[in-house]
Image (cartoon, helix red, strand yellow):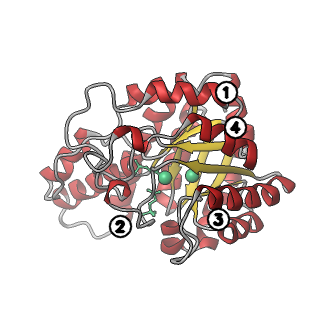
Amino acid sequence: ALVSLRQLLDHAAENDYGLPAFNVNNLEQIHAIMQAADECDSPVIMQGSAGARKYAGEPFLRHLIAAAVEAYPHIPIVMHQDHGASPSVCVNAIRSGFSSVMMDGSLEADAKTPSTYEYNVKVTSEVVGIAHSVGVSVEGELGCLGSLESGMGEAEDGHGAEGKLSHDQLLTDPEEAADFVKKTGVDALAIAIGTSHGAYKFTRKPTGDILAIERIKEIHQRIPNTHLVMHGSSSVPQEWLEIIRQYGGEMKETYGVPVEEIREGIKNGVRKVNIDTDIRLAMTGAIRRHMSQDKSNFDPRKFLKEATAAAKDICKARFESFGCAGQA
Ligand code: G3H
Ligand code: 13P
Ligand code: NA
Ligand code: ZN
């Protein structure tokens, strides 16, 4: 059944688990997520970005997720709009049936409107007013975590946060978070705690302190009833990077957020964990491998099936390690 983000995350908070929120763009990714969720009995959050809408077209994206709701009636599913750049983007998603939206007030409304704290409060409150009147949940964002298309600068465009700003400047301030939640009434808040979008997060192997766990604890203490969201939470599996390289892909050395650290975050109030890159890597690796190993095949279903299986394994591993397996 289609449920709101608030419903799922309230249950996650009551039962001390977290949920991956997977970005989706096509049939195969949705199949992969649903097959994994079905096998391990997990609730599901699927989210569409602006890029996904551009790729698939909003009606296709929405109907593909709706098809998952129909095909798996026993699994609670959230249809979430990721990184809404303006209230009108969010209102359109609400009108078309999404059960949750993200108002990303860190994205600028237009080239002339700089995104200030006041602007963020204003647009986010506006979306909460509309969304809550029809039972839709809202995720806000506070802090410098940015997104791929925001043009916010190199620190946040998926090419690694290291060395661009000091660690502390990138983190969400707990007092500001409390003020923001009080003024906006958001259900969930994306916080900056050391992650960034894309495959190129860290150039060195993480040594156990990627996430600002102390900061997560402080924020959670200040706003215990607001569910915390971690963007940029792909783990960038080294096995898949190896496979991609082995079959002709060119990817530089890079590391993501270790699953163990995400589990620490979940112990301290993180409930929604955004993952896109890991599925991209697994699908690309599986397709590259198939293309090299079966050079006579020209039926796309064969390599898409392998891509689906690879993505499914990633999803299942995340459902199991975030504690949401068995919670559907
Ligand atoms: O928020 C970032 C997600 O990874 C979506 O990426 O805009 O390329 O679809 P995208
Ligand atoms: P990754 O690039 O780490 O998968 O993050 C995705 C994300 O945060 C989508 O909003
Ligand atoms: Na989101
Ligand atoms: Zn994001």
Mark nearer the viewer, 2 or 3 = 3
Tell me if residue 54 comes above or below residue 297 in the rendering.
below
Q: Secondary structure at mark 2?
A: helix
Which residue occupies 67% across, 27% down? 13
Q: Nearer the viewer, residue 290 or 161?
A: 161
Closer to the chain start, of discs 1 and 4, is 4
Quadrant housing residue 21: top right
Amino acid at circle 1: Ala
Residue 146 position, x and y percent, is 45, 55
Closer to the chain start, of discs 3 and 1, is 1
Residue on which disc 1 sits:
13
Amino acid at circle 3: Arg
Residue on which disc 4 sits:
8
Disc 3 residue crowd, few under 14, some 14–19, many 20+, Cα 10 Å: many
Which residue occupies 82% across, 52% down? 132
Disc 2 residue crowd, few under 14, some 14–19, many 20+, Cα 10 Å: few
Amino acid at circle 4: Leu
Mark nearer the viewer, 4 or 2 = 4
Total number of numbered labels?
Answer: 4
Measure the C-alpha gap from mark 2 to mark 3.
23 Å
Residue on which disc 2 sits:
300
In screen coordinates, is 208 left or right of 222?
Answer: left
Tell me if residue 218 comes above or below residue 136 in the rendering.
above
Of the numbered discs in the image, which one, if any, rests on residue 128?
none
Measure the C-alpha gap from mark 4 to mark 2.
35 Å
Measure the C-alpha gap from mark 3 to mark 1.
27 Å
